[in-house]
Image (spheres, rainbow, N blue to C red):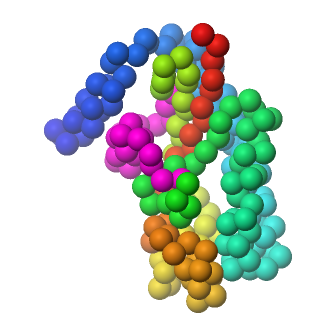
Amino acid sequence: MTDKIYPIFLLFLCFACSPKLDKETYKKYENSGQEITANVQTVLLSNVGKAIQTGGTEYAVKFCNLEANSIVDSLKGVFDCDISRVSAKNRNPQNALSTGQEKQLWELFANEQLADTVLQNGNDLVYYKPIRTGMPACLKCHGNTETDINAATKAKLNELYPNDLATGYKLNDFRGLWKVEFKRQK
C-alpha cells in the first residue's frame, strides 16, 4: 500500500504550488483531450492500417518512421494545441519521457493509479491519456520479438530504430501516453 501512496504524494508535491483548476475548467479540457486523442488515434491507426494492407508490417514500420509524426503534427493546427506521444519504452527517441513530471506520471499510469488527467503547467493545461496495445495487429510491430514480430519486420525495426524499446507488449498492455498541451491566454 505504501508504494502506491508514494508516487501519488510525489505528483501532489509537483503541483501543490500550482493554482487549482475549477471542476468546470477541468472537465472542459478533459473532454477536449478525449476528443482530440480519439480523433488523432483514429487517423493514425487508419493510416497505419492502410500501410499494412499496402505492404505488410515491414512497410508499415517504414511508413511510421516517415509519416507518423507528420500526421500527428498536421492535426495540431486543426485542434489548436500541441499533440505528442511519450513513453518510457519509446521507439522514436523524440517520444522519450523528457521531464521528471512525465516520469512520475508514467509510474502512476503504469501502476493503474491514474486515469486520463488534466494538469496545470503554469498558465497552460496538459491532458494525458494512456495508450494501450488495443488490437492484435499492434503486436505485429510491438509484440514479442520471438513470437509476434516476423523476421522482415524485425530487420526493418533494427534498421530504422536501432535503440527501439517499444517491443515485448501483450494485448492491452500500457504502451505510452498521449500528451495534449493547451496554451491558454494569461
Q: How many marks?
A: 0
* Magenta-span inclusion, residue 113: yes
Q: Residue at x 63, y 88 (%)?
A: 152
Residue 46 visible to an observer of this rendering: yes
Q: Residue at x 43, y 12 (%)?
A: 20
**Residue toward you, 160 or 55:** 160
* Magenta-span inclusion, residue 130: no
49 on left or right of 140:
right
25 on left or right of 53:
left
Q: Looking at the picture, does residue 155 appear above or below residue 23?
A: below
Rendered image quadrant of residue 68: bottom right
> Which residue occupies the extreme left position in the image?
2
Quarter of the figure that contains the N terminus = top left
Measured as percent of width and height from the top left, residue 61 is found at 67, 72
Q: Residue at x 24, y 40 (%)?
A: 4
Q: Looking at the picture, does residue 49 appear above or below residue 9?
A: below
131 on left or right of 110:
right
Measured as percent of width and height from the top left, residue 48 is found at 74, 64
Measured as percent of width and height from the top left, residue 158 is found at 55, 80
Measured as percent of width and height from the top left, residue 58 is found at 69, 80
Residue 34 visible to an observer of this rendering: no
> Which residue occupies the extreme bottom position in the image?
151
Quarter of the figure that contains the C terminus = top right
Residue interval drawn in magenta:
95-118
141 on left or right of 60:
left
Q: Residue at x 53, y 17 (%)?
A: 123
Q: Looking at the picture, does residue 142 appear above or below residue 113?
A: below
Rendered image quadrant of residue 49: bottom right
